[in-house]
Image (tube, rainbow, N blue to C red):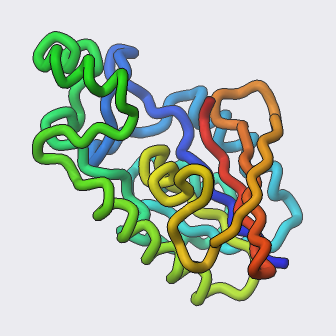
Amino acid sequence: MRSFYFMRHGEPDFPEGDTVCLGSEELPLSVAGVQQSHETAALFFGMEVSVFSSPRRQAVETARHFGRMIAILDDLRERDMGIFDGKSYSLIRTRYPDLYALSQRRAMLVPPGGEALEDGKARFSRAVEFVRKSCRGDAVIVTHADVMELFLGAPAPDYSGFLQVEVNDREEGTGRYRVVRRIESRMEKDSLWWFRKH
């Protein structure tokens, strides 16, 4: 059985410690993000895996901790967040109070100028299909929270290769980026593991 491990990038080094809305924005990893990436990569020690990454800096820096060649796939990038992109959440809350309030009630808000949900899901699905066809063994896919959630969906991803999935959550540690969701296909001999934050 092949497995696909979806891993969110480590914690970025946010300017002045103020969390930023990351879409097309690129940031280096923080000290904590480097440690998170190193610890997660260590889970794969001794395993033969191919590593694929979003082109965003925070994802590439995370993927480098696996010590393997990295295939960069543009379709693994995060959604463009339009007018929110690159702005701190404190600034968004002040400048766009109505939109910010809506985003707190609706996790998958599309800010003006942002990428449509269906477009983000479609391109991410293309990337996963490429990964499935281009490698014979297991794969690690280093990417971003929103596009992973769009792809995996709830209760099952709307993706022909992984229909009729069974989801089981289990803790892999106490860090923010160490929760694993395993999604096993009952139709095929593949499984998905989703590394995401709480």
How many marks do you count on the picture?
Answer: 0
At a point 13% along the width and 36% down the height, the residue shown is: 83
At a point 56% along the width and 62% down the height, the residue shown is: 157
Say above or below: 177 vs 80. above
Q: Quadrant of residue 14?
A: top left
Measured as percent of width and height from the top left, residue 54 is found at 44, 60
Q: Does residue 11 appear to the left or right of 22 in the view shown? A: right
Q: Does residue 49 appear to the left or right of 30 in the view shown? A: right
Measured as percent of width and height from the top left, residue 35 is found at 66, 34
For the residue pair 149 and 136, the one nearer the viewer reads as: 149
For the residue pair 66 and 176, the one nearer the viewer reads as: 176
Say above or below: 55 vs 162. above
Say above or below: 12 vs 18. below
At a point 31% along the width and 54% down the height, the residue shown is: 117
Measured as percent of width and height from the top left, residue 18 is found at 35, 16
At a point 85% along the width and 67% down the height, the residue shown is: 47
Q: Quadrant of residue 198?
A: top right
For the residue pair 166 and 93, the one nearer the viewer reads as: 166
Q: Does residue 85 appear to the left or right of 154 in the view shown? A: left
Name the image quarter holding the N terminus: bottom right
Measured as percent of width and height from the top left, residue 29 is found at 48, 37
